[in-house]
Image (cartoon, rainbow, N blue to C red):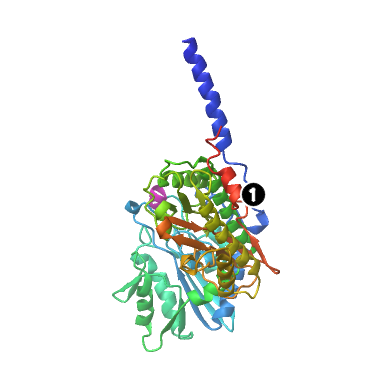
């Protein structure tokens, strides 16, 4: 009995030490000036965009529209059996700050200014809240959070779940607008269906059907243009609020990489590594992952979109992990490649350092006025100078914009406030060797800032980190 007590106390102490070591560090709050407390904090713990920021986004869209009507429609909820969480339509969220369904926003612009706007939200429904929790409803709370006066928020009544009957206020408003406004309509690509001359968003297929409804009102004059081109230009330059959310997503991702790489070892399964990262994301407040994780070892690292995560890592493998967190609906996108045994072979080191040299050359060339093409040219020149062959270099693009979408809209020529990835790679199938290094960069007035610089990247840093949890 005494021996059992001693063993139990020893295990308790060791477990406590391990838990303390792996515990999530204190998170520095994002300054309150960059957002507002989420209206439904039990759902997510991140600052929502302030009503002032949302109002400025809508004003900027009106300036881009000139004369016309902009419409956004919320994304439909996923099927419960799909295993997916609800994620708002990004244009709808960007302009309204509403992240539940149903939500329709209609803005009329005249001479580049907002002439009128209406936000259509459901009424409170006790049955809905019992089954699904709170959602955005018409009333003072939504008015305060969105910056849209309550007098301009219209209740969608009828239907417990925002069904077909509840869309009549939207129908009536659109029919009235079509008689006196320009024939050009900007639609965000939301999906829907029109049946019997009415509008329904009570379906997962909302796309061309909202367009069909609009055309059914005035088929002889209706012209519909995609909203994406206009919203994309606005979304490509991030505000200080957005930059802080992306910075937090990168920090959470970095914590995941530190944790997972410390525990990496030969014999680990790819899904184990993925699990270490996702645990770190959840424990640090991530709101999800922005794309399906890639944990690819050995020959799998040469498959650009490998997602099976079912191979056991072997001694001598290089592991390519393209895994990132999302925070406040904003994405990170980061990749690290490392030897699972903690030590690069001379050949692996040569290829790795050539890829790193390419990334560094591209990052040095990143500044306002530069383009992805110019960065890619600098990157490839550096990789070839470091000893790689053209056929071994990445067949994919060097990078892309990041924001609400992991592949966010954005121009090819950079301006301050844009966030992009730089992700060169080398893939040598005959050697079962794939290496990619990807980081997030913020374009500044004078150059660029790496938002993911906290994640080890040099050969020395990686060899010191990988497997350190197992070393004596």
**Chief SS of the magenta region:** helix
Say if the magenta span includes residue 164: no
Magenta span: 127-132
Relative to the observer, which residue lies in front, 358 or 273?
358
* Residue 422 x/y as whole percent: 56, 64
Above or below, 97 against 207 in this view is: above
Relative to the observer, which residue lies in front, 295 or 317?
317
User: Dividing the picture into quarters, in which one does residue 451 lie?
Assistant: bottom right
Q: Is residue 70 visible?
A: yes
Above or below, 203 against 307 in this view is: below
Q: Residues within 10 Å of mark 1 (few under 14, many from 20)?
A: few
Residue extending farthest left: 196
Residue extending farthest right: 446
For label 1, the residue is 29
Relative to the observer, which residue lies in front, 453 or 158?
453
Residue extending farthest top: 2
- Which residue is rendered at x = 59% and y = 75% of the image? 413
* Residue 7 x/y as whole percent: 50, 18
């Amino acid at each position: 009995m005494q021996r059992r007590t001693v063993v139990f106390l020893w295990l308790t102490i060791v477990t406590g030490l391990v838990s303390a070591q792996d515990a999530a560090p204190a998170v520095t709050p994002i300054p309150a000036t960059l957002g507002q407390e989420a209206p439904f904090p039990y759902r997510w713990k991140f600052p929502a965009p302030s009503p002032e920021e949302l109002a400025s986004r809508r004003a900027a869209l009106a300036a881009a529209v000139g004369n016309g009507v902009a419409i956004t429609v919320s994304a439909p909820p996923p099927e419960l059996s799909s295993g997916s969480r609800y994620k708002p339509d990004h244009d709808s969220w960007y302009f309204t700050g509403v992240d539940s369904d149903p939500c329709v926003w209609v803005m009329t612009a005249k001479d580049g200014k907002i002439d009128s706007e209406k936000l259509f939200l459901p009424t409170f429904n006790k049955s809905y809240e019992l089954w699904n929790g709170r959602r955005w409803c018409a009333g003072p709370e939504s008015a305060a959070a969105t910056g849209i006066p309550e007098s301009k928020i219209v209740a969608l009544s009828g239907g417990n779940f925002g069904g077909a009957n509840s869309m009549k206020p939207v129908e009536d408003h659109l029919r009235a607008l079509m008689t006196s406004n320009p024939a050009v309509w900007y639609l965000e690509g939301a999906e829907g269906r029109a049946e019997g001359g009415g509008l329904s968003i009570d379906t997962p297929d909302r796309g061309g059907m909202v367009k069909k409804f609009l055309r059914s009102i005035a088929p002889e004059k209706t012209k519909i243009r995609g909203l994406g081109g206009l919203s994309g230009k606005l979304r490509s330059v991030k505000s200080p609020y957005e930059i802080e959310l992306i910075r937090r997503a990168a920090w959470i991702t970095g914590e995941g990489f530190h944790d997972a790489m410390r525990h990496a070892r030969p014999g680990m399964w790819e899904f184990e590594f993925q699990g270490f990262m996702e645990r770190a994301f959840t424990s640090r407040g991530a709101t999800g992952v922005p794309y399906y994780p890639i944990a690819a070892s050995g020959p799998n690292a040469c498959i650009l979109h490998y997602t099976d995560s079912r191979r056991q890592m072997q001694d001598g493998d290089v592991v390519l992990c393209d895994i990132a967190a999302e925070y406040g609906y904003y994405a990170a996108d980061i990749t690290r490649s490392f030897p699972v045994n903690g030590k690069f072979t001379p050949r692996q080191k040569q290829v790795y350092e050539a890829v790193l040299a390419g990334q560094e050359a591209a990052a040095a060339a990143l500044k306002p006025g530069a383009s992805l093409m110019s960065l890619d040219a600098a990157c490839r020149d550096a990789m070839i100078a470091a000893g790689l062959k053209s056929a071994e270099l990445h067949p994919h693009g060097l990078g892309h914009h990041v924001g609400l979408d992991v592949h966010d809209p954005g121009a090819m020529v950079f301006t301050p406030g844009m966030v992009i990835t730089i992700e060169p790679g080398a893939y040598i199938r005959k050697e079962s060797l794939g290496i990619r290094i990807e980081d997030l960069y913020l374009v500044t007035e004078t150059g660029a800032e790496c938002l993911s610089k906290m994640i080890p990247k040099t050969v020395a840093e990686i060899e010191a980190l990988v497997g350190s949890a197992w070393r004596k």
